[in-house]
Amino acid sequence: DSGVTQTPKHLITATGQRVTLRCSPRSGDLSVYWYQQSLDQGLQFLIHYYNGEERAKGNILERFSAQQFPDLHSELNLSSLELGDSALYFCASSVPAGATDTQYFGPGTRLTVL
Amino acid sequence: LAKTTQPISMDSYEGQEVNITCSHNNIATNDYITWYQQFPSQGPRFIIQGYKTKVTNEVASLFIPADRKSSTLSLPRVSLSDTAVYYCLVGVNNAGNMLTFGGGTRLMVKP
């Protein structure tokens, strides 16, 4: 158990709908990262928040958005869903530790768009 | 960000030592090298991290030559449960800068 929690574990929805994925980082971690992993694909970095502020954006679609709240939990919002958005969505958290950093990943949310 | 190159897949047998090499020719002076392991449908898990020479922990060893343009993850006496994807990452994650996961190496351990 990494200490990072994600809800829900599974989500099934229809095309055109909107969903919200939630991530609670490890206690004390200031950074939250979101990744998308499609079937048999590598991890695609989506977005990174540090202490409530957006730090970096990766291959995140305009239909997707995220935010990190004052209590440091984060939500990833996916709208106008398409079949191709079906994937595992992971969040990870970390705390800066000198010049190195270790990301701790949650168990993921499996999104199925029908 | 330094680009990494790893073999797409490797096969091994139980009890053997497995070495997975990662190339990172444009590694920067401040960059660290980190390896993660991912089982199917699970989030990646940190294995080991190093800057130069050799690092060893209870799970693996990491060998980094003097020029730091490559690194080798060594898994001693693998078992079936070591079947997973292994990712090599290079960069500095100070104050939350991002690291990039490449395609990883899919290790299959056979009985």
Image (spheres, coloured by chain):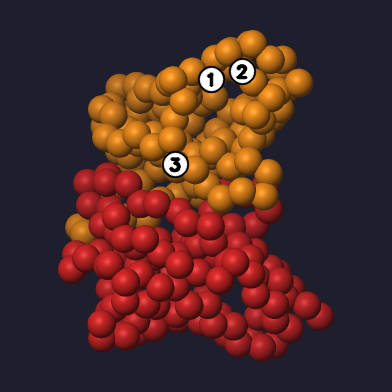
Residue A34: % across, % down: 45, 36
Q: Are marks 1 and 2 on the same chain?
A: yes
Instruction: Name, please, the residue furthest toward the right.
Output: B111
Residue visible at 56% across and 71% down in the picture: B7
Q: Amino acid at mark 1?
A: Leu
Picture colour for chain B: red
Q: Residue B84 falls in which quadrant of the image?
A: bottom right
Q: Is disc 3 surrounded by few (<14), some (14 to 19) or many (20+) residues within 10 Å?
A: many
Q: CA distance from mark 3 to mark 1?
A: 15 Å
Percent position (x, y) of residue B49? 37, 69
Numbered circle sitting on residue A78: 1
Would you name the residue on which mark 3 appears?
A45
**Which residue bears the numbered disc 2?**
A81
Dot 2 and dot 3 within a common chain: yes
Amino acid type, mark 2: Leu
Q: CA distance from mark 1 to mark 2?
A: 7 Å
Label 2, label 3: how many angstroms apart (C-alpha)? Answer: 19 Å
Rendered position, B66 above or below B48:
below
Write down which chain is painted orange.
Answer: A
Q: What residue sits 22% from the left and 65% below the top?
A: B28
Counting labels gives: 3
Q: Nearer the viewer, residue A108 or B101?
A: B101
Q: Residues within 10 Å of mark 2 (few under 14, many from 20)?
A: many
Q: B48 or B3, which is in the foreground? A: B3
Chain label for disc 3: A
Viewer-nearest of discs 1 and 2? 2
Q: Quadrant of the N terminus of chain B?
A: bottom left
Q: Secondary structure at mark 3?
A: strand
Q: Which mark is residue A50?
A: none
